[in-house]
Image (tube, coloured by chain):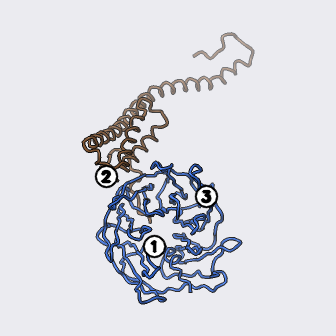
Chain colours: A blue, B brown
Amino acid sequence: MDLLEGNLELKEIQKLEGHTDRVWSVAWNPATGAAGIPAMFASCSGDKTVRIWQQTPSARCSASFECKAVLEETHNRTVRSCAWSPSGKLLATASFDATTAIWEHIGDDFECVSTLEGHENEVKSVSWNASGSLLATCSRDKSVWIWEVQPGNEFECVAVLQGHTQDVKMVKWHPFMDVLFSCSYDNTVKVWAEDGDTDDWHCVQTLGEPNNGHTSTVWALSFNSTGDKMVTCSDDLTLKIWETDSRIPQETDGYMPWRHLSTLTGYHDRTIFSVHWSSEGVIASGAADDAIRLFIENKDGLEELNASFSWAHRTANGMADTLAKQGVFR
Amino acid sequence: MDSKPANPKPLEDIFDSSVNLEETHFQEGYKDGFNDGLVLGKQEGREVGLKLGFEVGEELGFYRGCVDVWNAANRVDSSCFSSRVQKNIRQMEELIEKYPFLDPENESVQEIMDALRSKFRAISATLSLKLEYDGYPKSTDVKDLEF
């Protein structure tokens, strides 16, 4: 599919109602949407609940999602973000009530099997590593916590990482290396890696203004499918692309640093809250200017596709995830 | 204070002493201030030292107590903690022992204290302990909600 040539259109195919307060984030269940398994995603909201939506098997092209479950009576405040484990069996939900709940998906039911406490205040984001053995959370308390999954859905805290000087907005593991990325209100992206196998995690790189980094809050980051490029979005109205050497680091070599590749300016005139790099190479960004923009790389660099438009929502926060993954190109 | 030179000198010296007046007053004022400052400084230093020393001591004592209890529990039942938690407890103990009690100006004091707090929170979180040390300020104050 040559996206640059085609006439692209982003069309709303369904509006899902049910939440009684703003929806902050959505996450697709990675074990669904293929091989006959109907697509499923979770949405989390200021109404303190998480809703699970599933595509009805009958409808194919015109996707018809319905609410299969409501995960409630667990969080006392807004659920800010959610993430499925790679196996799709566990769902982690991060809440302003300073806890992260772990839900197990068995059959049609979801049961809260664990609650991770430790952050001093609002947990902003949660992310599973590629193998599902580690979970990272971050919070307004400026720290990033790493947890290890033990048998029986027990979680052990591996590390409490201090380093950011302000609210940490998002954490994300590299798509296949156990290297953790966090972005913050302090305008930086930090990279965290473990020293061998010792549980000794520390910040191996900080991407800030001196590295051509953002000049205001970095809200989100996302990796391309090959893991050698990353896109970040910020309150400074830009998107930045970063790259690293694609060689897999050797045992002793340690860590491959990231460097700034390019900056996309002028596409949004309000804070860009969310960005996602789809597996097919399309970058979707959502901003407070009510717009979602799609970008693809051509031989000269990144170029905007003719598919930007104003979304019906007041703020296109968290939508980038949905669009990029679903590939609603018509 | 005698501002006249000892030996009568040429004309310039008469003006010299008026110029010197400013300089001399400056020197005297400096001396007074320095001496007062020495006294006050020592006093304040003592007060601050006592206060900070107490705070640090109390916090270190708290961690020492926790480690001792955990070690005792471990002796009773060596399987009550996972290997990671045991390692963290050992590391906490090493940090407490490493803390330069008698050298408050040692640069590593803040680093060791931060590491201790971090380890303590990691262990508490894993053991689901709602234990908290009340003394130190949290990393955040009461602030407005953000997104």
Residue at 72%, 13% in the rendered image = B9
SS for callout 2: loop
Q: Nearer the viewer, mark 2 or mark 1?
A: 1
Query: Mark 3 falls within which chain?
Result: A
Q: Which of the 4 image quadrants contains residue B23?
A: top right
Quarter of the figure with the C terminus of chain A = bottom right
Name the kind of residue labelled 3 in the image: Trp
Q: Position of residue A85 (x, y in %)?
A: 42, 67
The answer to whether marks 2 and 3 mark residues whose Cβ atoms lie closer than 8 Å is no
**One can see residue B130 in this view:** yes
How packed is label 1: few (under 14 Cα within 10 Å), some, or many (20 or more)? some
Q: Position of residue A274 (x, y in %)?
A: 52, 70
Vertical position of residue A280 compared to residue A251: above or below:
below
**One can see residue A81 in this view:** no
Tag 2 and tag 1 share a subunit: no
SS for callout 3: strand
**Of label 1 and label 3, which has the lower sequence position?**
1
Q: CA distance from mark 2 to mark 1?
A: 31 Å
Q: Which of the 4 image quadrants contains residue A17?
A: bottom left
User: Which residue does the numbered mark 3 point to in the structure image?
Assistant: A258
SS for callout 1: loop
Q: CA distance from mark 1 to mark 3?
A: 27 Å
Vertical position of residue B68 compared to residue A127: above or below:
above
Q: Nearer the viewer, mark 1 or mark 3?
A: 1
Tag 1 and tag 3 share a subunit: yes
Residue at 49%, 54% in the rendered image = A164
The count of marks equals: 3
User: Which residue does the numbered mark 2 point to in the structure image?
Assistant: B127
Name the kind of residue labelled 2 in the image: Leu
Q: Is residue A76 left or right of residue B94?
A: left
> Which mark, residue A30?
1
Q: Position of residue B117 (x, y in %)?
A: 39, 46
